[in-house]
Image (spheres, rainbow, N blue to C red):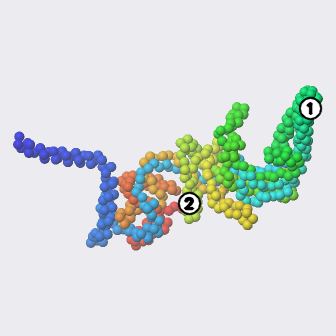
């Protein structure tokens, strides 16, 4: 019994060690990447002080040993020259990635929204032209003045003034008869007939007011005729208002319900600083214009479309993108670098395929912004928009989602022959590592999570091409300046 009890602590220790080893193997994927990164960081600090007789230094690296020919030490100035700031030296993360189709596209106006035609509401002669081609105006800004010569409008105004005069006479007569009726000098029937006549005149005036509005006069102009008791000789034409639709008012038609904005909703929701650009002037001072004739065309570039031209076989994939509400990315070519606009909404997919080009059109919403706003010596305003109709670009339309991938910017990888490389930070050095690139597009590259690099590793997220050239120059071999780039 004594010998058995003496061996019990030994057996317990072996059991404990076995349990520890088994637990370590089970949880390997959790603790090893962090421990591995810590060991490499500690080894990188000591790397410069430990040299072997062969002239090569080695760091403790779980992925294998890297000689001096695959390692590059950069000064702080070199890091800044390469743009390797903290933003581009971040630990790798595993995230979802959406594989995208690259589709050519062009910026186009919104039909019925971007361009608006300003027409002459009545026949007349243009007496003033306030508008200038290219000028930016706000809704309500005077554009033209027209001296009215429309015979029907002259007649309508004359009849309106005549009815106003008759109503004034009738009101004065009713006031006189009311005093006489109270004293018994006339019968109450006579006063009642006069009141009926007044009511008929008021109804006629309401109809004549509406007729003047149908001729193109505003409420303010009709009120001006009524107050001043004279014909309106000229008409001021102003910049139109931008359509804003609200869901609070419904206009019901046969078989359908159409939602529209009330006048109050229009005035509340419409931006007060909307810049309408005068694109084309069609008339000049002294010109006679007919009712309905185009005076000018104004454009509101604040909301545009991007029209993508996909192959007809891509229709199911694009339809799937729209059904899942995946956002679209636009890439605008520019100098010194392309401009990327993310989180764009796919508005709708066309219902027809072009017979000649076999292209399927789809449309993405694009919010525009003003980049320049100046005034000339006489106070006329001119604006510059960031995006313009006709501008060419490319759309990245997601068609498939990969749930857990290591995704880096495309400038973080470099190709040489059949190999792809990244540069991982190791203390003050950057070690070149061969990796497997599963997928690459214009913006991103997907690196296989196969143990070559781990989440938490810090790699250079840009300037891989420059780092590769510096490494080649260091080793003394010629560097191909186009290595890793396709044209």
**Residue drawn at x 85%, y 35% as measured from the top left:** 203
Q: Quadrant of the N terminus?
A: top left
Foreground residue among 186 and 108: 186
Foreground residue among 416 and 4: 4
Q: Residues within 10 Å of mark 1 (few under 14, many from 20)?
A: some
Relative side of 249 to 62, left or right? right
Relative side of 326 to 134, left or right? left
Which mark is first along the chain, 1 or 2?
1
Foreground residue among 445 and 385: 385
Residue 302, given in percent of the width and then of the height, sits at 65, 53
Residue farthest to the right, as pictured: 185
Q: Which mark is residue 180?
A: 1
Element under disc 2: loop
Q: Which mark is residue 167?
A: none
As drawn, 430 above or below 250 = below
The answer, for residue 313, to whether it is visible in the render is no
Residue 48, given in percent of the width and then of the height, sits at 32, 69
**Residue drawn at x 82%, y 40% as measured from the top left:** 210
Q: CA distance from mark 2 to mark 1?
A: 89 Å
Residue 295, given in percent of the width and then of the height, sits at 80, 53
**Residue drawn at x 31%, y 53% as measured from the top left:** 32
Foreground residue among 249 and 355: 249
Q: Which residue is mark 2?
A: 338
Number of callouts = 2
**Residue drawn at x 56%, y 60% as measured from the top left:** 338
Residue 350, given in percent of the width and then of the height, sits at 64, 44
Relative side of 257 to 176, left or right? left
């Amino acid at each position: 019994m004594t010998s058995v009890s003496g061996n019990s602590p030994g057996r317990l220790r072996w059991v404990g060690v076995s349990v520890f080893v088994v637990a370590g193997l089970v949880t390997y994927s959790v603790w090893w990447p962090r421990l591995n990164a810590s060991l490499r960081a500690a080894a990188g600090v000591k790397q410069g002080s430990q040299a072997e007789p062969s002239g090569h230094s080695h760091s403790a690296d779980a992925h294998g040993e890297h000689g001096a020919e695959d390692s590059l030490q950069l000064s702080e100035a070199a890091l800044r020259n390469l743009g390797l700031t903290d933003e581009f030296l971040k630990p790798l993360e595993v995230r979802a990635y959406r594989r995208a189709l690259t589709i050519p596209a062009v910026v186009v106006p919104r039909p019925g929204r971007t361009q608006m035609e300003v027409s002459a509401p009545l026949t007349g002669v243009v007496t003033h032209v306030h508008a200038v081609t290219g000028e930016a105006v706000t809704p309500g800004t005077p554009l033209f003045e027209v001296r009215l010569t429309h015979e029907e409008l002259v007649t309508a105004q004359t009849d309106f003034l005549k009815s106003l005069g008759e109503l004034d006479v009738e009101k004065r007569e009713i006031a006189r008869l009311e005093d006489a009726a109270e004293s018994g000098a006339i019968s109450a029937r006579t006063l009642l007939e006069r009141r009926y006549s007044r009511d008929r005149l008021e109804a006629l005036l309401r109809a004549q007011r509406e007729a003047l509005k149908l001729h193109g006069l505003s409420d303010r102009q009709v009120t001006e005729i009524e107050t001043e008791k004279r014909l309106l000789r000229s008409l001021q034409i102003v910049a139109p208002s931008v359509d804003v639709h609200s869901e609070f008012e419904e206009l019901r038609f046969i078989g359908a319900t159409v939602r529209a904005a009330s006048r109050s909703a229009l005035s509340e929701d419409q931006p007060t600083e909307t810049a309408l650009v005068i694109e084309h002037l069609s008339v000049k001072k002294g010109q006679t214009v007919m009712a309905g004739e185009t005076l000018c065309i104004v454009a509101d570039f604040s909301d545009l479309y991007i029209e993508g031209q996909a192959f007809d076989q891509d229709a199911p994939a694009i339809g799937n993108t729209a059904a899942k509400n995946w956002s679209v990315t636009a890439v605008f070519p520019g100098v010194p670098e392309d401009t990327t606009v993310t989180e764009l909404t796919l508005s709708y997919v066309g219902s027809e395929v072009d017979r000649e080009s076999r292209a399927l059109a789809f449309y993405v919403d694009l919010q525009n912004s003003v980049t320049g706003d100046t005034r000339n010596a006489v106070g006329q305003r001119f604006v510059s928009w960031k995006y313009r109709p006709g501008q060419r670009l490319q759309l990245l339309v997601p068609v498939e989602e990969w749930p857990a991938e290591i995704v880096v910017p495309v400038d973080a990888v470099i190709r040489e022959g059949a190999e792809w490389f990244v540069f991982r930070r190791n203390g003050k050095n950057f070690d070149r590592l061969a990796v497997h690139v599963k997928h690459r597009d214009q913006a991103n590259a997907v690196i296989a999570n196969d143990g070559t690099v781990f989440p938490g590793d810090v790699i250079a997220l840009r300037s891989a091409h420059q780092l590769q050239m510096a490494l080649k120059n260091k080793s003394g071999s010629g560097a191909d300046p186009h290595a890793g780039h396709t044209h």
